[in-house]
């Protein structure tokens, strides 16, 4: 797998992770109407990441017809990943400080750490500039 092909798997895997976390959040509270937003948010954010993964299929080179689509999908996916990391970290901080939401803090921590790990894995795929000789 080349560096250009790798983002699609990372985006789709991260989307599945978010969807799974959303499902777990709702299931852990018996699918009560008050916590169903966890499932909807997890499924929605997972779907967005999966769409970025689908948009980043292929290994286009500069000048190819699909290169622009690929670049947009990869960069939107990176921005969404950064946004989700910040949101989950903020939710963890808020839940940890509120006794009524303290039971959600571990899930938010897992989601924040998983999002940060996905971001690190994606940034590592960035092509390196050639060193001048």
Image (tube, rainbow, N blue to C red):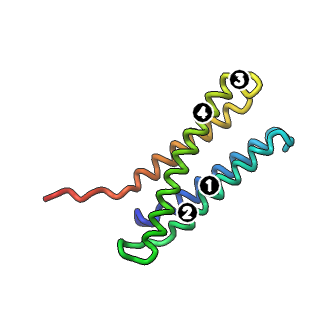
Which residue is found at the position 52% from the left and 56% from the top?
77
Identify the residue under disc 3: 98
* Lower position in the chain sequence, tag 3 or tag 1: 1
Q: Quadrant of residue 60?
A: bottom left
Q: Is residue 69 above or below residue 77?
A: below
Which residue is found at the position 86% from the left and 42% from the top?
33
Q: CA distance from mark 3 to mark 4?
A: 13 Å
Q: Is residue 71 above or below residue 94?
A: below
Q: CA distance from mark 1 to mark 4?
A: 20 Å
Identify the residue under disc 1: 15
Which numbered mark, 4 or 2, is in the foreground of this view? 4
Which residue is found at the position 59% from the left and 57% from the top?
49
Identify the residue under disc 2: 53
Q: CA distance from mark 2 to mark 1?
A: 9 Å
Q: Is residue 31 above or below residue 51?
A: above
Identify the residue under disc 4: 90
Spot occupied by residue 130 in the image (x, y as percentages of width and height): 23, 59
Label 4 Cα neighbours within 10 Å, binned few <14 / some 14-19 / many ≥20: some
Q: Are marks 2 and 1 in contact (CB under 8 Å)?
A: yes
* Lower position in the chain sequence, tag 4 or tag 2: 2
Q: Are marks 1 and 4 in contact (CB under 8 Å)?
A: no
Q: CA distance from mark 3 to mark 2?
A: 36 Å
């Amino acid at each position: 797998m080349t560096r250009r092909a790798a983002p699609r798997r990372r985006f789709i895997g991260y989307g599945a992770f978010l969807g799974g976390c959303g499902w777990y959040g709702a299931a852990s509270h018996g699918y009560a109407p008050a916590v169903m937003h966890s499932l909807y948010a997890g499924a929605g954010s997972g779907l967005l990441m999966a769409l970025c993964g689908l948009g980043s299929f292929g290994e286009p080179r500069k000048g190819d017809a699909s290169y622009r689509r690929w670049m947009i999908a990869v960069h939107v996916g990176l921005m969404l990943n950064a946004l989700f990391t910040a949101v989950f970290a903020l939710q963890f901080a808020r839940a940890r400080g509120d006794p009524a939401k303290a039971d959600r803090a571990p899930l938010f921590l897992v989601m924040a750490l998983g999002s940060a790990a996905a971001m690190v894995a994606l940034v590592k795929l960035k092509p390196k500039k050639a060193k001048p000789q």
